[in-house]
Amino acid sequence: MDERGPTWRLWRGDELLADLVVTAADFPWLQAVVEAMPAFDSVRDLFVEELRLVERIDDDYPAWEAVDAQIRATVSLQNPEGVRVPDFLMHIDGETAWWRWSDQPLEP
């Protein structure tokens, strides 16, 4: 029997980048195993850079904010019901992702 958690999906346009299989939830954050598709390699460096910058966010918030905006302009996040969510904040470190999301676009 497969005991997988709910699966979210990361997209670039109509191209599936990764399945995100939820392993834990600590409201408002979800954590998941990243099951990357070959196309994920095209955005992997964005997430590596975002994680590097978030670890030093107090030193250069505008740089982190720019990479985060680039991620959200490049990819979309689909919930387990198949609906793409309007806004999210996501970190990916290797095969682990954690994010929070909103049903409404967040204000800048």
Image (spheres, rainbow, N blue to C red):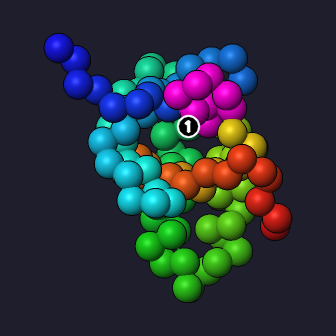
- Which residue occupies 38% across, 52% down? 25
Please, what is the three-letter code of the amino acid marked with disc 1?
A: Val
**Residue with the most extreme bottom position:** 58
Residue 79 part of the magenta segment: yes
Residue 64 part of the magenta segment: no
Q: Nearer the viewer, residue 107 or 60?
A: 107
Q: Nearer the viewer, residue 84 or 56?
A: 84
Q: Is residue 104 left or right of residue 25?
A: right
- Could you say which quadrant of the image residue 59 lies in? bottom right
Q: In this view, does 31 lie to the left or right of 77?
A: left
Residue where numbered disc 1 is placed:
43
What secondary structure is the stretch in magenta mostly built from? loop
Tell me the magenta residue range.
Answer: 76-84
- Which residue occupies 39% across, 59% down? 26
**Can residue 91 be seen?**
no
Residue 58 lies, in percent from the top left, at: 55, 85
Indicate the secondary structure of the residue bearing disc 1: helix
- Which residue occupies 62% across, 68% down? 64
Say which quadrant the N terminus sits in.
top left
- Which residue occupies 41% across, 30% down? 6
Label 1 packing within 10 angstroms: few (<14), some (14-19), many (20+): some
Say which quadrant the C terminus sits in.
bottom right
Q: Nearer the viewer, residue 105 or 52?
A: 105
Residue 7 lies, in percent from the top left, at: 44, 28
Residue 84 lies, in percent from the top left, at: 69, 32
Depicted 88 relative to depicted 2: above or below: below
Residue 16 lies, in percent from the top left, at: 56, 20
Q: Nearer the viewer, residue 102 or 55?
A: 102
- Could you say which quadrant of the image residue 79 lies in? top right
**Can residue 25 be seen?**
yes
**Residue with the most extreme left position:** 1
